[in-house]
Amino acid sequence: MQALADRSPVPVRLAAVQGRFPPEVETAAYYVCAEALANVSKHASATAASIDVTSRYGRLTVIVRDDGVGGADHSRGSGLRGLADRVEALGGRLAIESTPRSGTTLIAEISLDANA
């Protein structure tokens, strides 16, 4: 995640739990962050973003926020829909909060149970 944050043209604050998780969970979390930051740089007109990664109750939660223009809609493109499919395939869910002029928050909750 640090490499994604470092390469972002928009400054990113990263706070992530230490430790390793199942490879498929780590891969999904990486893609969530990569797609979210790509959208921030392409569409959000943001001045800052953040990534918070926590692990509780058998789930890895990834929250990506920006202070941009908002208005993200997973039904208008394949990137966010693809992320939702990836997260849901692991027994998780993806939520997007994106009110116009109020930035965007993307929340991915990914099950740590490989049998979810």
Image: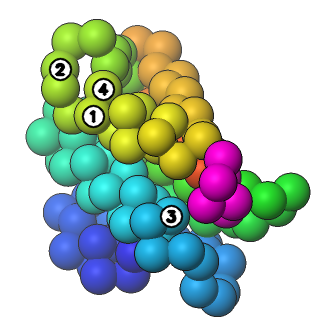
Quarter location, residue 79: top left
Q: Give the residue at x 74% y 66%.
A: 55
Q: Is residue 88 above or below residue 69?
A: below
Q: Closer to the observer: label 3 or label 4?
A: 3
Label 1: element kind: helix
Q: Are marks 2 and 4 in contact (CB under 8 Å)?
A: yes
State whether residue 12 appears in this view.
no
State whether residue 64 appears in this view.
yes
Name the amino acid, label 3: Val
Distance Cα–Cα, label 1 vs label 3: 15 Å
Mark carried by residue 81:
4
Q: Magenta residues?
A: 111-116
Label 3: element kind: helix
Q: Residues within 10 Å of mark 1 (few under 14, many from 20)?
A: some
Q: Position of residue 18 (x, y in %)?
A: 65, 87
Name the amino acid, label 4: Arg
Distance Cα–Cα, label 2 vs label 3: 23 Å
